[in-house]
Image (cartoon, rainbow, N blue to C red):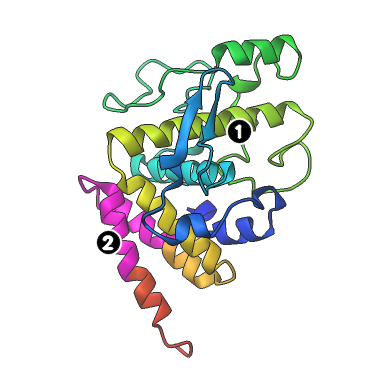
Amino acid sequence: MEEISRLGEILSLNTHWSSVQFSSFKSGDILPLDFVQFNKRTGRYEVEEGSNVTEDDVIIQAMVIFALYRLEKGWGRERAIKALSVWRGKSKRGSYDADDIFPLQNLWKEDIQQAIAEEKLGKTTLSHPDSFDNFPRFYGTTQRNPWKRRSNTYKNQVHIYAEQAAVQMALHLHRHVSTDYSFLASTIIYYALKFYDDEELMICLSVSLLESARKESACYPKTALDDLDEAIKTELNKDPEE
């Protein structure tokens, strides 16, 4: 999980995540996903008015949950992208796990068609895994066009739709499967924001998540939370001369 191990670095250096707030992940009582609803008029997930969380708080939590679910399922990058409801490419028969709940309904079909008609998006752009290449990396690969989070290229629309689909997935897991996904994601983001310059701790965090996934427990996020708490305590208490 290289992406998770670099999350602190990405959030601290990437100006496109400048509105992510440490306060939104500091307490277990605040889960950004609790403050978001789908606006049918705009076709976007939006933060409730009067809440103290930002849109990017919600999006980064959703993207981390997406990464965790991918880790739990043992998916490669291309298979994970196909779990997003906005994916428009063909999939081979039998390529999906029989018990998997994703992809959900594509809430943006008309929006996507309009974007294509207005030449803001190519007809096949959402059909190529390469179009999503920097999305699973939290946009940490490069800040140059067209791969940065926001640009004046087709990738800009890809990223917007992918983020919306990630929020859709995360909300489904949060509301219908287990809130532990959200707690685990918040915990990871908390450590990433607080210890962004501690490379060893972030690697420890990433390794712990991977080892928890290999246990194949009945509830991966709960197992990962328990394992992560122990791993981080051990890392923080380690003698620096060891």
| Residue 100, x across and y down, in percent | 31, 28
- Front residue of 205/92: it is 205
| Up-down relation of residue 149 to residue 193 (above or below) | above
Q: Picture quarter containing residue 154?
A: top right
Amino acid under disc 2: Asp
| Residue 130 visible within the image | no
Secondary element at tag 1? helix
Residue positioned 36% across, 52% down in the render: 183
Which residues are drawn in magenta?
206-230
- Front residue of 205/149: it is 149
Residue positioned 74% across, 19% down in the render: 120
Amino acid under disc 1: Phe
Q: Label 2 neighbourhood size at 10 Å, few (<14), some (14-19), many (20+)?
A: few
Q: Picture quarter containing residue 6?
A: bottom right
| Residue 34 visible within the image | yes
Furthest-front residue in this view:
50
